[in-house]
Image: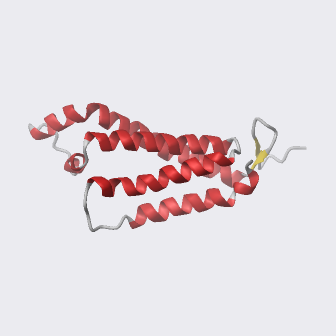
């Protein structure tokens, strides 16, 4: 009899409910981030031209242009790898953990390669560490 609190993957192994939840959160977060970074990369020149001509009067819009166009392309790929890692962990593949963790660590480092700042990304480090630890805790269910 199947316990309805656990979800069974395609290979018949049970995925813990907590792993399902953090994977879904990653699908949402990394999926939206990958999409938005791709859109910014593809429309960067147009957005910059509109901003410089005064046609883009959104509060904080200048933050987008502190980074170059290539930053958004690299971010897109890293968030895509993060999403791919979560998809693998959804299917209980250990390799997904490593893919996800590497992508997330690189995403923490990436902004400092483009903009020199003294501000430490504490929230980003805490969030990334929390998710990596949650996934690490579920490695025993993966092969």
Residue at x-position 69% and y-position 44%: 93
Position of residue 82 relative to residue 139, above or below, is: above
Left or right of 20: which side holds 99? left
Tag count: 0
| Snapshot quadrant of residue 35 | top left
Which image quarter holds the N terminus?
top right
Q: Splitting the image into 4 quarters, where does residue 88 fall?
A: top right
- Outermost residue, right direction? 1
Indicate the position of residue 64 as horizontal and vertical percent values. 25, 46
Return the x and y of residue 50 as percentages of the image width and height. Answer: 15, 35
In this view, the residue in front, 131 or 116, is 116
Measuring 74% from the left and 47% from the top, which residue is drawn there?
A: 143
Residue 124 in percent (x, y) is at 42, 60
* Residue 102 screen position, x and y as percent: 52, 52
Q: Residue at x 20, y 31 (%)?
A: 46
Q: How are the residues colored?
A: secondary structure
Q: Nearer the viewer, residue 6 or 77?
A: 77
Residue for point 54% across, 54% down: 101
Report the front residue among 16 and 11. Answer: 11
Picture quadrant where residue 139 is located: bottom right
């Amino acid at each position: 009899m199947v316990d309805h609190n656990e979800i069974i993957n395609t290979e018949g192994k049970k995925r813990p409910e907590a792993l399902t939840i953090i994977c879904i959160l990653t699908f949402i977060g990394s999926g939206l981030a990958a999409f938005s970074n791709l859109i910014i990369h593809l429309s960067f020149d147009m957005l910059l031209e509109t901003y410089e001509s005064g046609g883009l009067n959104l509060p904080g819009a200048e933050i987008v242009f502190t980074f170059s166009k290539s930053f958004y392309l690299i971010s897109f790929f890293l968030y895509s790898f993060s999403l791919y890692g979560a998809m693998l962990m959804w299917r209980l593949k250990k390799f997904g953990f490593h893919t996800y963790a590497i992508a997330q660590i690189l995403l923490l480092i990436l902004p400092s390669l483009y903009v020199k700042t003294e501000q430490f990304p504490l929230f980003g480090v805490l969030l990334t560490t929390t998710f990596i630890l949650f996934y690490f805790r579920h490695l025993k269910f993966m092969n």
